[in-house]
Amino acid sequence: MAADPPAPKSGSSADRLRLEEPSLWIRRQVVPFAIFMLFLMLLSAAGSFFKVDLPSQPWWRRAPEYWIYPLQTIACLVVLVRWWKSYEFNWSLKWVLIGACFGAVGIGFWLLPTYLYDSLGLQSEGWWNWLGLASRRDGFNPAEHFEEGGAAYWFALVMRFVRAAVVVALVEEIFWRSFLMRMVLDFDGDYWKQPFGKPSWLSFLVVTGLFVLAHLPVDYAGALIYGSLTYALCVWSRNLGACVVMHFVANLLMGLYAVGFGKYGLW
C-alpha cells in the first residue's frame, strides 16, 4: 500500500472536533448510520407484526415502507444538517467531477447483470442470480399503492430518491469511509487520529466485505465491484466529499434506471 497521506489541513471545525473531542466525533460519525439502521429494524418488525397484505387493508398496512422510509429520511437529514460542520467533506470541483465519474462507472457494473438477464432471455432462478442476473421487477413501486401521477405517488417517489441519493450517500460514506476505515487501522489505539483515506489491505477487506454483506445476495457481485471502486477513490482522493458524490450519482442513476425500466427490485 502507499505511504501515509499528509496531515489534514488545520483549522477546520471537523478536524478540531476529531482531534480534540474524539468521543463527540465518534458519536456524530456513528449516530446517523445507527438511526438509519433502527428504521430498517422497525420496517422488519412492521413486516412481521403489523403488515397485512390484503387489498381490503389501507396502504399503510399493506406497505409500511411507504411511511417508514420518509420518516427515516427526515430523521437522518435532521441529524446530518445539525452536525454538518462535524464532517470532513473538503468539497472541491475536481473531486466532485471525478467522484461523479466513478459513480457512473460503478453503478454501470451494478446494473449490467440485470440488463444481461433480459438480453440473454433468462427466465428462471439459478446460480447466475449470485452474479446479479435476475429480473429485479418486484420492489418499490408507488404505482402499486397510489394513483400514478397523484400527489401521494410523487411524494413517495421523491422521498425515495432523497433517501437513496442523499441520505444513503451521506450516512454510509460517513460511517464506512470516515469512521470504520480509521477504526480498523488502529482499533486499540487513537484511531480517530488516523488521516482520512489512509490505505491498508485490512481496511479494504473489512470495509468492502461488510459493505457487500449489507446488501442482498443478488447484489453481492455488484457491491463488491462498486465497494472496491469506492475504496480506490477514497485512498486516491483522500476526500470524503468525492466518495459522497460517487454514492449520490450511483444511487440517483440506479433509481432512474429502476423507474424508467420497471426494475423496482434494484432499490
Image: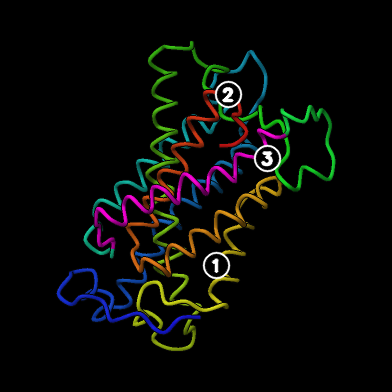
In which quadrant will I find the C terminus?
A: top right
> From which residue to which does the magenta span run?
89-116
Outermost residue on the bottom side: it is: 189
> Residue flagged by tag 1: what amino acid is it?
Val
The main secondary structure of the magenta stretch is: helix
Query: Are circles 3 and 1 on residues that touch, CB within 8 Å?
Result: no
**Residue 40 higher or lower than 139, as above or below:** below
User: Where residue 220 sits in the image (x, y, percent)?
Assistant: 67, 52
> Residue flagged by tag 2: what amino acid is it?
Phe
Gap in Å between the C-alphas at discs 3 and 1?
24 Å
Can you tell which of label 2 and label 1 is closer to the viewer? 2
Does label 3 or label 2 sit earlier along the sequence?
Answer: 3
The residue where tag 3 is placed is: 113
Question: Splitting the image into 4 quarters, where does residue 195 fall?
Answer: bottom left
Does label 2 or label 1 sit earlier along the sequence?
Answer: 1
Judge whether residue 233 is colored magenta. no
Outermost residue on the left side: it is: 11
Gap in Å between the C-alphas at discs 3 and 2?
14 Å
User: Where residue 70 sits in the image (x, y, percent)?
Assistant: 41, 35
Question: Splitting the image into 4 quarters, where does residue 205 fall?
Answer: bottom right
> Residue flagged by tag 3: what amino acid is it?
Pro
**Residue 149 higher or lower than 38, as above or below:** above
Residue at image coords 67%, 32% = 136
Gap in Å between the C-alphas at discs 2 and 1?
31 Å
Secondary element at image label 1: helix
The residue where tag 1 is placed is: 207
The residue where tag 2 is placed is: 261
